Amino acid sequence: MSKVPTITLNNGVEMPRLGFGVWQVPDDEATAAVATALEAGYRSIDTAALYANEEGTGRALAASGLPRGELFVTTKLWNSDQGYDPALRAFDRSLDKLGLDYVDLYLIHWPQPRRDAYTETWRALERIAADGRARAVGVSNFQPGHLRRLVDGSELVPAVNQIEVHPQLAQAELRALHAELGIATEAWSPLGQGKGLLDNPVIAKVAARHGRTPAQVVLRWHLQLGNVVIPKSVTPSRIRENIDVFGFELTTDDLADLAALDDGTRLGPDPDHFG
Ligand code: NAD
């Protein structure tokens, strides 16, 4: 059994609070990376049509021999497939590539506000959820205005908004809105893509206090803020290190030190303008 605690999404579905992200992992390497993650105790895997590794991911899920009910599989609808019919067709392709008959979570990858198709696309995700082909549906990279518009005009509130969050981009405003609307915050690039953040002296100091690594401290910060996290690595020792974060706790002082790192640094595109 997995040792990762879960959160209860707004439709009652349980989602592991820590999962494994596979962005930038080539399809032929995804099978080994996901297999290592499953052996290490991860049960939640985050892929996307864009990542072009749904097949490799699906092969590892099938080969693991784990019961489907123990796994939590997320994939995402790519920008070019927004719109009602295109979204339904894209979802079928993703299921087929994963070799599954349902996913646990299906997300609209980016809002693309200038295209203005996300509310219509959401109708397709509502239909997919109603048909039981996704146990939960949600969005990714939605800004406060996009979320409010979606929620005001829809039956179904997204279960999750997967957004860029790390100590340099703590996203206080969005997290507060998620709490108000009952949407879970899932943090992408939770380790800051391993670029510099993990060398930060403040994080090193907190890590030394606990005899832990910088990556473990950053993952703990997310968990204590209430975020779901999906760190990525293809290195087996790091894959294991990143799930070994449930045996210690950051103090209020540690959290205050880390809060001072929030300077609004974005590593990915600005969702208001991307796509
Ligand atoms: P991440 O923050 O998880 O960082 C991954 C990198 O950090 C690795 O490539 C490695 O260089 C380094 N790293 C990992 N573990 C380490 C350790 N223990 N010690 C030292 N260095 C370590 O970055 P990410 O891959 O961008 O984000 C995680 C996942 O989030 C992705 O794989 C993907 O599933 C998802 N994501 C989603 C979106 C979106 O638009 N929805 C965008 C980006 C990423």
Image (cartoon, helix red, strand yellow):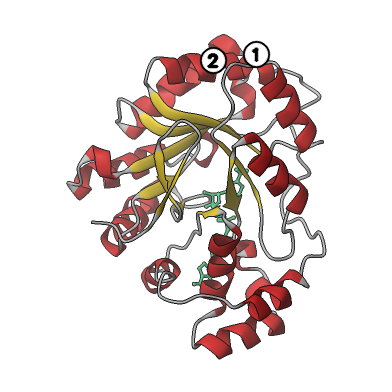
Residue 274 x, y percent position in the rendering:
76, 36
184 left or right, relative to 239: right
x and y percent of residue 45 in the render? 41, 47
Confirm if mark 1 falls within 8 A of ligand 1. no
User: Marks 2 and 1: in contact by CB < 8 Å?
Assistant: yes
Q: Which mark is residue 120?
A: 1
The amino acid pointed to by label 1 is Glu
Q: CA distance from mark 1 to mark 2?
A: 7 Å
- The quarter of the image that holds ligand 1 is bottom right
Residue identifier under label 2:
124
What is the x, y in percent for residue 50?
Answer: 54, 37
Picture disc at residue 29: none
The residue at the point 34 percent across, 59 percent down is 37
Task: Classify the position of the N terminus by image quarter.
Answer: bottom left
Q: Is mark 2 within 8 Å of ligand 1?
A: no
Image quadrant in which the C terminus is located: top right
Q: Residue at x 70, y 85 (%)?
A: 201
What is the crowding at mark 2: few (fewer than 14 residues within 10 Å), some, or many (at least 20)?
A: many
Q: Residue at x 30, y 30 (%)?
A: 100
Q: Position of residue 77 (x, y in %)?
A: 55, 28
Q: Nearer the viewer, residue 239 or 218?
A: 218
